[in-house]
Amino acid sequence: MKAEKPNYFDLVYQVVREIPKGRVTSYGAIANYLGLKSGARMVGYAMNAAHALPDVPAQRVVNRQGLLTGKHHFGSPTRMQELLEGDGVQIENDQVVNFEAVFWDPEKELGF
């Protein structure tokens, strides 16, 4: 019997679970790490579906400029920001403050 390969969403969730509290990453960084042909958009689809998974800290995934572009998937317009601030990430005007300093790159942190 052949072992079942994990689907893309599961692979994305595995990476997102590794993002430490107080850090953020981008859709594209996850896509690059996983070698996803569909790229950042596929990671975005996975994050849109992650709201039902309490062990996936989806708030820690932002766009490549540090904007909270996925905030409308959190049930209220401020919930993503509240979760990030609870993690210790400072947000101003839907933007991660000091984005470069808190950016977590899975390629560097997890390796291949």
Image (cartoon, helix red, strand yellow):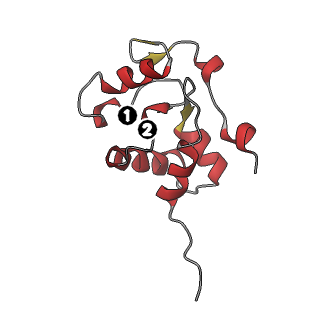
Q: Nearer the viewer, residue 96 or 64?
A: 96
Residue 99, x across and y down, in percent: 58, 18
Q: Which residue of the protein is positioned furthest toward the left in this rendering?
A: 76
Measure the alpha-carbon separation of dots 2 and 1: 9 Å
Q: Which residue of the protein is positioned furthest toward the bottom in this rendering?
A: 1
Residue 95, x across and y down, in percent: 45, 17
Residue 40, x across and y down, in percent: 52, 45
Q: Is residue 65 above or below residue 48?
A: above
Q: Nearer the viewer, residue 109 or 29?
A: 109
Q: Please indicate whether residue 58 sits to the left or right of residue 79 in the image.
A: right
**Would residue 62 be visible to someone looking at this image?**
no
Q: Is residue 82 above or below residue 30?
A: above
Q: Nearer the viewer, residue 45 or 112?
A: 112
Which quarter of the rendered picture does the N terminus lie within? bottom right
Q: Is residue 20 above or below residue 66?
A: below
Q: Please indicate whether residue 95 sits to the left or right of residue 17 in the image.
A: left
Q: Are marks 2 and 1 in contact (CB under 8 Å)?
A: yes
Circle 2 packing at 10 Å, graded few (<14), some (14-19), many (20+), is many
Q: Is residue 104 above or below residue 6?
A: above
Residue at coordinates 59% horizontally, 85% vertically from top-left? 2
Residue 81, x across and y down, in percent: 38, 21
- Disc 2 is placed on an element classified as helix
Q: Nearer the viewer, residue 66 or 7?
A: 7
**Would residue 75 be visible to someone looking at this image?**
yes
Provide the residue designation for mark 1.
70
Three-letter code for the amino acid on which mark 1 is drawn:
Gly
Provide the residue designation for mark 2.
58
